[in-house]
Image: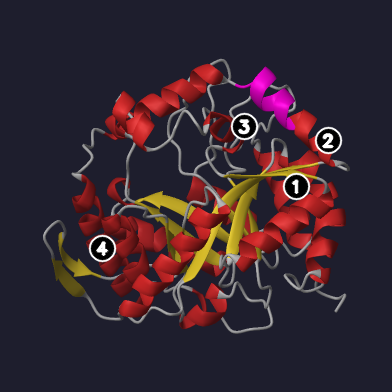
Amino acid sequence: MSREPTVANRAALYNDNKLKLGFFASNCSSGRAATKVPERWRASWEDNLAFAQAADAADIDFLLPIARWKGYRGETNFHGSVLEATMWACGLLAQTQRMTIFSTIHAPLFHPVVAAKQIATADLIGRGRMAMNVVCGWNQDEFDMFAIENREHDKRYAYAREWLQVIRRLWSEEQEFDYDGEFLKLRNLISNPKPYGGARPLIMNAGASAAGQQFALEQSDILFSLLITPEQGRKAVEAARARAAMINRTDIKIFTAGYYVCRPTRQEAIDYHRYYVEEHGDFEAYEHLLDLQFPSPEARQHHGAEALRKRHIGGNGSYPMIGSPDDIANELKMISDLGYDGMAASFVNYAEEFPLFRDEVLPRLERLGLRSPPAGEA
């Protein structure tokens, strides 16, 4: 890294790439694809390390894990085997050089003193490349494993606000302090060592409701926002930036999620998508996931779950990018033009599919002005 680890440089992920590119959920079995195909991602440590090092060498900007504690059943038990996000990040930070690596943390499940120490330690290992995706909780099936009841929706964000306030102070204050909030009442708090270089790690949140987005815009450096259609995405970005400006957060970054099916030709990509989604999708796992997310038919209808079935099986509801390298590059250019700053995406098999993306899509993005040449090639 050629820049000092200020918060601003961390938020730029230490480079000038207009559209930041990262990969999502490689710590989870099957990644983001609820499919039964034999080549689906197994998420072993060895595969994660090899993929991370290949992505780092290609100047990919970040990796983002999912925090998952229990699988979604079905024939594959989708997300049944998951490397814990903070430990995963520590291991990868120790064996990569440039990329930012996130942990994803459920605020209700980790005491803020523990979380602050974990993330600061990881940040020292990565010399300023650690970041934290804060999750406020939704999956009661998982929370039951911890004997923790989900709070009412808006109170989840009120709790997380206090949780982050404690962590920020632990990262910055040199003297012991007390914290007396609605949810947290803590005494004689202190944590050392501090994060690397005197600047705190980045914070991301994916709040989508009114309360969730307000929390994300107030408390985070990166708002993670769902992209359904280009028109919806454009409006969502404009609305988020307008709300951010009202609270003087013009520095906020907006990332979204997608999945790639990139093949030498568009027809090959379309055929493969049909193969792993329609012919070999793990529909039982998908139905169980929907039951947890949307427990009533009305909720499913409100969120358009049935209409997005292929997208949910293909990439856990994220935006599909299916086609040739030209098609993928053009989709990413469109997403950047909508106002997004970053894309976190997945493959069916990260290690097998990344080389084509690296060799064919990344150079196209350079020519489109979205990416700088890899280090040493400028």
Tell me, for residue 50, which label it has, or none: 1
Q: Identify the coloring.
A: secondary structure
Disc 1 and disc 2 in contact, CB within 8 angstroms: no
The amino acid type, in three-letter code, at marker 2 is Gln
Q: In terms of sequence position, does the residue under pointer 4 or pointer 2 come before the other? A: 4
The amino acid type, in three-letter code, at marker 1 is Ala
- The residue tagged 3 is 30
Mark 2 or 3, which is nearer the eye?
2
Q: Work out which quarter of the rendered image holds the N terminus and state it.
A: bottom right
x and y, in percent, of residue 88 in the image: 56, 48
x and y, in percent, of residue 307 in the image: 50, 31
Pointer 1 local density, CA inside 10 Å: few below 14, some 14–19, many at least 20: some
- Can residue 22 be seen in this snapshot? yes
Q: In terms of sequence position, does the residue under pointer 1 or pointer 4 come before the other? A: 1
- Residue 197, compared with residue 144, is above or below; it is below
Residue at the (46%, 51%) spot, across then down: 104
Mark 1 or 4, which is nearer the eye?
4
- Magenta span of residues: 273-281
Task: Label 2: state its secondary structure.
Answer: helix
Q: Rounded to the nearest whole Å, what is the CA distance between mark 2 and mark 3? A: 24 Å
- The residue tagged 2 is 267
Q: Work out which quarter of the rendered image holds the C terminus and state it.
A: bottom right
- Residue 48, compared with residue 338, is above or below; it is above
Residue at the (53%, 56%) spot, across then down: 231
